[in-house]
Structure formats: structure tokens, C-alpha cells
Image (tube, rainbow, N blue to C red):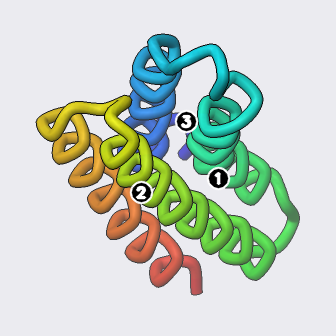
Amino acid sequence: MKVEDLDVFKLAHNLTLKVYEITASYPESERFGLTSQMRRASTSVCMNLMEGAYRISKNEYKHFVSISRGSCGEVKYQLMLSKDLGYLDEGTFKEMTEAYERVSMMLTKLHSSLK
């Protein structure tokens, strides 16, 4: 199975698109700050899944799945910061945070399955 066909990859990719959409309305002063950081962290989830899947060994793949999970944590904090700074409404914050928590759990299961 290709990594792009995994539900976790599809969900993470859709969340990345949503992060790009959300951050487009952030203040210009955040262009090289929070906007850039959120976009890089969200893309890191899929990029590391893809890179890991293309590695030779399962241990390497597991390592990159772990990095992807760490990137989920980064995005979750950035969402909280965005909400606290007034850039993100409560509903969007909750929706996105719950979705990233789901991705995180899915990555944990994927990591466990790579024995």
C-alpha cells in the first residue's frame, strides 16, 4: 500500500490545506513567524510520513512516523497560541485540535504496527 493511501496521510494532508487556509488571514506581521511555523509544522507531518515510507528499513520508517507525531504536537501548540492571540476562533481551534489529536493517535497505531 502506498503511504498516500493511508487514512492518516489523507487526514494530515487535508489538515495541512486547512492550516494554509487559516493562516492566510493572519496578520502580515506573522508572515515570517507563526504563519510560517504553522505551515512548516503541518507539512512536516506528511513529509515525514512520505520520507519514512521511502526508507529501506522499518526501523527508519518508525523513526519518521515518530517525527510526524512530534510535528502534530507543534501544530497543536501553534493552534493554541493562535487562539490566545485572537487569530483563531474557538470553534476552529477545537475542530483543528481534535483532528490533530486523531492524527496523533493514528500515528501511534501506525508506529506500533511497524514491527
Residue that carries the numbered disc 3 in the rendered image = 4
Residues 107 and 35: in front is 35
Residues 4 and 91: in front is 91
Mark 3 residue type: Glu
Considering only vertical position in the picture, is 67 above or below 15? below
User: Which of label 1 and label 2 is nearer to you?
Assistant: 2
Considering only vertical position in the picture, is 74 above or below 31? below
For residue 56, side relative to residue 51 (left or right) = right
x 28%, y 58%: residue:
102
Q: Please, what secondary structure does the residue beneath circle 3 have?
A: helix
For residue 19, side relative to residue 58 (left or right) = left
x 40%, y 65%: residue:
104
Label 1, label 2: how far apart the Cα atoms are: 18 Å
In the image, residue 26 lies at what x, y percent?
49, 20
In the image, residue 111 lies at what x, y percent?
52, 76
Residue that carries the numbered disc 2 in the rendered image = 76
Residue that carries the numbered disc 1 in the rendered image = 49
Q: Please, what secondary structure does the residue beneath circle 1 have?
A: helix
